[in-house]
Image (tube, helix red, strand yellow):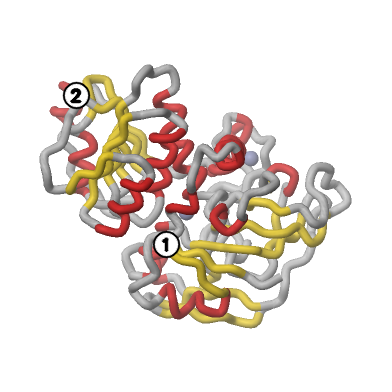
Amino acid sequence: MKSLMFVAPGQLRFDEVDAPSLVEGTDALVRPLAATTCDLDHHVIEDKTPFSGFGPFPIGHECVGTVVEVGPDCTDVAVGDVVGVASHIACGTCAQCELGHTARCLRHGDAQYGLPVNGAWGGTFDELIRVPYADFNLAKLPAGVDPVHLASIGDNLALGWETVMPTVAGVSDPKIAVFGGTGSIGLYCVDVAVHCAGARTVYHDDDPARMKVAEQLGAEVHDIHGKREKDFHLAVDASCNPERLRKALLSVMPEGHVNSVGIYFDDVRLPLLALYQRGVHFHNGKGHARPNMTPTLEAVAAGTLHPELVTSGVYGWDEIPRVLTSGRAGHKPVFVLEN
Ligand SMILES: [Zn+2]
Ligand SMILES: [Zn+2]
């Protein structure tokens, strides 16, 4: 089969590799229907991460696909199911998985698709993917939804739900700020904030394309360099930019929450005295996709969420290397594999 390899910054290519096969009885094999980039992948390709020096490796960890083979111990998934694939490798039964912390699985640690960490699981731009603990790690797509715009369900799209909903649960008339800067996560957060949390939502950025999408999703859109309000229940830092992180931290009401979904590979100076005086709850860490995929899919099926507005372009599978190294991939390009 063909596997998309990250070779070096700015260099992607398809390699011919052995296709995976079932190893455990709880495994399934999935052929992608559509796959997309995590915001992190763009930074890997642009030489902005430590991973950028570790090529070649299979890249990509977001896809939806069709189950083509299941092991004898699978009871929930069946051949022919159209599913979203969780980006992390999680057993579903250890103490961390039971808490919903699937990116901290005690059996598999940091293991995931599409990055050179903890095992060779391939990437979601491969033509066939082995999914362990398939009953747990696969989420069936609801009938009647277009799988193309759900390609991100196993990571960034579910992260939109996770970043917003638990934090504002029980808050009446929530007010949420999103500071954008990476491709898609901030926009998925806006979608959830407006349509699921019913929040007054203000989106800050300086990228015209993303600002337009945020407006279509129902946010008030402010230039990142303009004045900002400082009484949000929740500020989301989806920027990977220390200045924007600082703005997010100083935008919440006393005892407010800041959830940062950007990854900072270097130390960042923080205004700790101001945070002390304000009382700020700060979370920065990986998303735990699997438990958040189900409510996200239910909201899409109900017509509440609009991930199709975040998709920046739909392309053929053969176009992946060219589009992703062109510098014009947009904030969320989706690639469709002929089946
Ligand atoms: Zn990711
Ligand atoms: Zn586990």
Q: In this view, does 125 lie to the left or right of 55?
A: right
Q: Quadrant of residue 235?
A: top left
Residue flagged by tag 2: what amino acid is it? Tyr
Residue flagged by tag 1: what amino acid is it? Ser
Asked whether 104 or 73 is in front, the reply is: 73
Pointer 2 residue: 276
Q: Is residue 105 visible?
A: no
Q: Which residue is drawn at 43% across and 29% down?
A: 197
Bin the neighbour count of mark 1 within 10 Å (Cα to Cα): few under 14, some 14-19, many 20 and up: some
Asked whether 287 or 221 is in front, the reply is: 221
Q: Which residue is drawn at 56% across and 50% down?
A: 154
Pointer 1 residue: 312
User: How far from the left and from the top, in percent, is residue 248?
Assistant: 23, 38
Q: Earlier in the sequence, mark 1 or mark 2?
A: 2
Q: Residue at x 37, y 65 (%)?
A: 330
User: How far from the left and from the top, in percent, is residue 242?
Assistant: 21, 48
Q: Is residue 320 left or right of residue 253?
A: right
Describe the element under mark 1 as helix, strand or loop: loop
